[in-house]
Image (cartoon, helix red, strand yellow):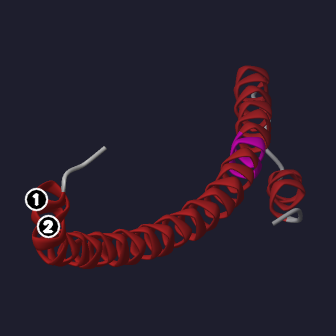
Amino acid sequence: MLSIDEINDLEKMYPTAIKQYNSLLKKYNEVLKIAKENTDANEYCLQSLECKIESLSRENDKLKEEVLNLRGQNIQYELVLRDIKNTAKNNIKLGCVISGGWLEQKIDEVLKDD
C-alpha cells in the first residue's frame, strides 16, 4: 500500500505525465497524417506508372504486330525478286528478251497486297 506522501507525489506528477502524453499523442497523430499523405501520394504514383506501363505494353504489342507484318512483306518481296532475278538470268542465257508485261505482273503481285 502507498503512503499519503507517495500518493501526493504521484498526484503532483500526474499533470506533467498528462502533458507528456498529450504531446506524444499530438506527435503520433502528425506522423500518422504524414504517413497517410505519403501513402496516398505513393498510391497515385503507382497507379500512374501502372497506366503508363499498360499503355507502353499496348504500343509494344502493336509495334510487334507491325514488325511481323513487315517481315512477312519483306519475305514476299525477296521471293518475288529472286524469281525475277532467276527468270532474267535464265532468259539472258537463252538470249531471250524479258517481257515487260511479265515483269509488271510480278511487281503487281507483290504490290497488290499493300
For mark 2, give the secondary structure: helix
Q: Position of residue 30 (x, y in %)?
A: 27, 78
Q: In the displayed structure, does residue 67 sit left or right of residue 47?
A: right
Q: Amino acid at mark 2?
A: Asn
Q: In the displayed structure, does residue 22 sit left or right of residue 82?
A: left
Q: Is residue 70 visible?
A: yes
Pick whichever, 22 or 57, lies toward us. Answer: 22
Q: Is residue 97 visible?
A: no
Furthest-front residue in this view: 4
Instruction: Characterize the magenta stretch by its predominant secondary structure.
Output: helix
Task: Characterize the local packing of mark 2: few (<14), some (14-19) or many (20 or more) Cα atoms within 10 angstroms.
Answer: few
Q: How far apart in space, not on screen, are marks 2 and 1 (Cα)?
A: 5 Å
Q: Position of residue 74 (x, y in %)?
A: 69, 43
Q: Quadrant of residue 55?
A: bottom right
Q: Amino acid at mark 1?
A: Asp
Q: Quadrant of the N terminus?
A: top left
Tell me the residue at 28%/70% (across/down): 31
Tell me the residue at 36%/71% (across/down): 32
Cβ atoms at labels 2 and 1 below 8 Å apart: yes
Chain part drawn in magenta: 69-74
Q: Position of residue 21 (x, y in %)?
A: 24, 70
Tell me the residue at 70%/26% (across/down): 89
Asked if residue 91 lies in the magenta stretch, the reply is no
Q: Which mark is residue 14?
A: none
Q: In the displayed structure, does residue 5 sit left or right of residue 109?
A: left
Say which residue label 2 marks.
8
Say which residue label 1 marks.
5
For mark 1, give the secondary structure: helix
Tell me the residue at 10%/62% (across/down): 9
Q: Quadrant of residue 47?
A: bottom right
